[in-house]
Amino acid sequence: MIKAEQKPFEEILEYLAPYNKILLSGCGACVTVCHAGGEKDGALLASALRMARQKIGKPLEIIESTPARQCEPEFAQELADTVGQVQAVLSVSCGVGVQTLARNFPATQIFPGVNTLFMGETVAHGVWEERCQACGDCILEKTAGICPIARCAKQLLNGPCGGSSNGKCEIKRETDCAWQLIFDRSKALGQLHRLTEIIPAKQWGVQSRDSGPRRIVREDLKV
């Protein structure tokens, strides 16, 4: 899932400074799971904003709403009546949700309330780690289900680099070496022979966003 964290509180206060009535819109999907923008986290942020503005004698009226998924236009449209009542929207969704609201409500200023970080996995309660960079050319079948693009600091496709020590990355010592993990899991699966296959360089300009925004079109689903 997409992982995000709340922007610095002072930064949010600063861009809401000109407004007296806003909508704080959360998202019931990814940011709820990582406690960055769900209904509960939105309510806490709204409460803190109200208190901060009350303290300086400039009250801020906040309407709170958390659609199931802010990145889907049909859910975003559920906010239409409320958006019409406010001066601006604070979106505590990922960057996709912010842009979905911006596209659906072109006359209203939409501010991001979180920094979108990565697609990750929950590895412990309150700890999330990056697992996928959406490169567009998945090779997990060749690397024992462990992604060197997201987890190797050097993004080596045919590792290891030789710089790891005791299974840890030389760039960030607290991080497991991705290629050590790939080797260990391949060995456990009896698939070490796969590591002798050369993985060709990716065509970044074609498959990644280096060539601009990517698009998926499913003709069978279009109406």
Image (tube, grey):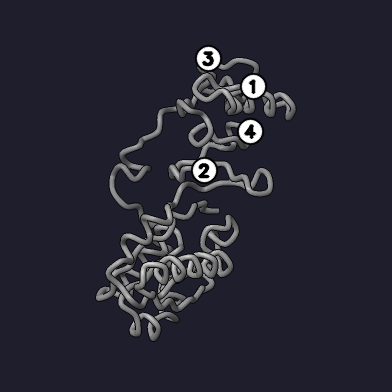
**What whole-number distance in Å separates the C-alpha atoms at marks 1 and 4?**
11 Å
Q: Residue at x 37, y 67 (%)?
A: 56
Q: Sequence order check: which comes first, mark 2 or mark 1?
A: 2
Q: Sequence order check: which comes first, mark 3 or mark 2?
A: 2
Find residue 144 and name its label. Answer: 4
**What whole-number distance in Å separates the C-alpha atoms at marks 1 and 3?**
22 Å
**What whole-number distance in Å separates the C-alpha atoms at marks 4 and 2?**
14 Å
Foreground mark, 3 or 2?
A: 3
Q: Which residue is mark 3?
A: 163
Find residue 19 and name its label. Answer: none
Find residue 193 and name its label. Answer: 1
Foreground mark, 1 or 4?
A: 4
Amino acid type of the residue tagged 1 in the rendering: His
**Where is residue 11 drawn, in percent x and y?**
36, 55
**What whole-number distance in Å separates the C-alpha atoms at marks 4 and 3?**
21 Å
Crowdedness of circle 2 by 10 Å Cα count: few (<14), some, many (20+)? Answer: some
- In this rendering, position of residue 214 left or right of residue 187: left
